[in-house]
């Protein structure tokens, strides 16, 4: 179990190649495998190792399609360093179309399960394998997330303050990304998340969040293009690709810290605001309406802030995230 040999260093030592495939990690009940998909492009010349992953939460697809798009576009003869794309770290959840993998006896949120445990449930084991064999081998990691099946997320990138090596790289990635909302992640909201655990072992990581349930029909290609553009720009910033990228003018950037606010009651979630509205403290942002059409509660802004993300599915359960409020830094 999880002892399958996979030597990333051996693969990336060979310059000028492109390969994709799966790593088998464990046999399942039906004799198929729990697997990890990868796409690797080794540039003709040496350079940094950029790891780009998606679907640690299985229903957040936008970055996964962008990873495939970039992989298919990259020409190793015109590239320095190594691009490693892992479109679905949590392939079991991806298959199920759910945030977490139903295969575990006790469901586990993979983005609270890092750096993993080789003796735990399969999600912990996959996290461990991925962290040891991919994350620790990278110079920089971009981890895509999004609104998934329940939320809408305004396109944003996380960074840590540029006061140490990783901070500097994540700040440079934020500048290059082309994204207008920057989330200062000096204080991580969760333990066991990939960016936080990677940072602890000296691997800088930027999370890009975007899209989700609210926009995935009409704006799917736009979200994939924003994601692919961010990857390409960051590769240019780290001298893996030639060329310039367009910077977002400084006055258009919203630099925020995010607070997750939960709904106290369940019902229909009826928004009274739009994404990126600037709302005042105590302003009503949504109403919770019961099955008889009566208002039972509301969600208010905890401070003056931007609406960075919101629960976009028609109904919300009590205790679920209703909003991600972005307080200007
Ligand atoms: Zn996520």
Image (cartoon, grey):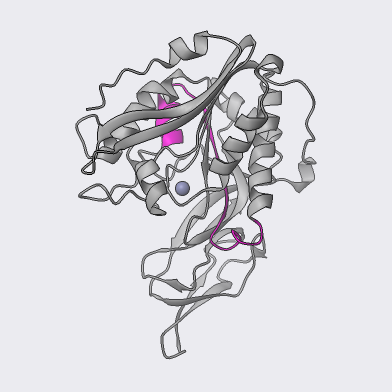
Query: Seen in the image, is 250 located left or right of residue 74?
Result: right
Task: Kindly identify the residue that appears in the image at 38 percent across and 71 percent down.
Answer: 264
Q: Give x and y (percent) for residue 199.
A: 45, 28
Quadrant the N terminus occupies: top left
Q: In front: 323, or 46?
A: 46
Q: In front: 297, or 290?
A: 290
Q: In front: 231, or 168?
A: 231
Q: Give x and y (percent) for residue 55.
A: 46, 43
Q: Indicate whether 198 appears above or below 275.
A: above
Task: Kindly identify the residue that appears in the image at 45 percent across and 12 percent down.
Answer: 9
State which quadrant residue 70 falls in: top right
Residue 115 visible to an observer of this rendering: no
Query: Seen in the image, is 196 located left or right of residue 112?
Result: right
Q: Give x and y (percent) for residue 128.
A: 31, 29
Task: Kindly identify the residue that appears in the image at 59 percent across and 30 percent down.
Answer: 170
* Span shown in magenta: 194-219
Q: Indicate whether 270 appears above or below 260.
A: below
Q: Give x and y (percent) for residue 119.
A: 19, 31
């Amino acid at each position: 179990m999880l002892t399958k040999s996979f030597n990333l260093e051996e693969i990336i030592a060979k310059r000028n190649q492109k390969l994709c495939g799966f790593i088998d990690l464990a046999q399942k009940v039906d004799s198929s495998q729990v697997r990890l998909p990868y796409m690797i492009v080794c540039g003709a010349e040496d350079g940094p190792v950029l790891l780009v992953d998606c679907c640690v939460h299985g229903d957040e697809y936008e970055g996964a399609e962008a990873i495939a798009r970039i992989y298919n576009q990259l020409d190793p003869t015109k590239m320095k360093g190594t691009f490693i794309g892992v479109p679905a770290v949590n392939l079991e959840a991806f298959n199920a179309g759910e945030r977490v993998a139903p295969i575990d006896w006790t469901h586990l949120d993979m983005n609270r399960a890092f750096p993993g445990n080789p003796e735990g449930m399969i999600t912990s084991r996959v996290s461990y394998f991925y962290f040891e064999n991919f994350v620790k081998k990278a110079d920089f990691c971009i981890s895509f997330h999004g609104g998934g099946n329940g939320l809408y997320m305004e396109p944003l990138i996380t960074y840590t303050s540029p006061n140490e090596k990783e901070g500097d790289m994540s700040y440079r990635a934020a500048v290059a990304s082309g994204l207008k909302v920057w989330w200062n992640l000096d204080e991580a909201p969760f333990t066991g998340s990939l960016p936080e655990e990677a940072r602890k072992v000296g691997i800088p990581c930027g999370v890009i969040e975007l899209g989700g349930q609210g926009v995935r029909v009409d704006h799917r290609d736009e979200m994939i293009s924003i994601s692919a553009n961010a990857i390409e720009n960051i590769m240019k910033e780290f001298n893996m690709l030639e060329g310039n990228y367009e910077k977002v003018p400084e006055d258009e950037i919203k630099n925020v810290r995010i607070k997750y606010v939960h709904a106290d009651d369940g019902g229909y979630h009826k928004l009274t605001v739009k994404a990126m509205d600037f709302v005042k403290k105590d302003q009503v942002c949504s109403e919770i309406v019961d099955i008889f059409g009566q208002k039972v509660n509301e969600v208010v802004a905890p401070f003056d802030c931007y609406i960075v993300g919101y629960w976009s599915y028609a109904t919300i359960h009590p205790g679920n995230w209703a909003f991600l409020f972005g307080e200007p830094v």
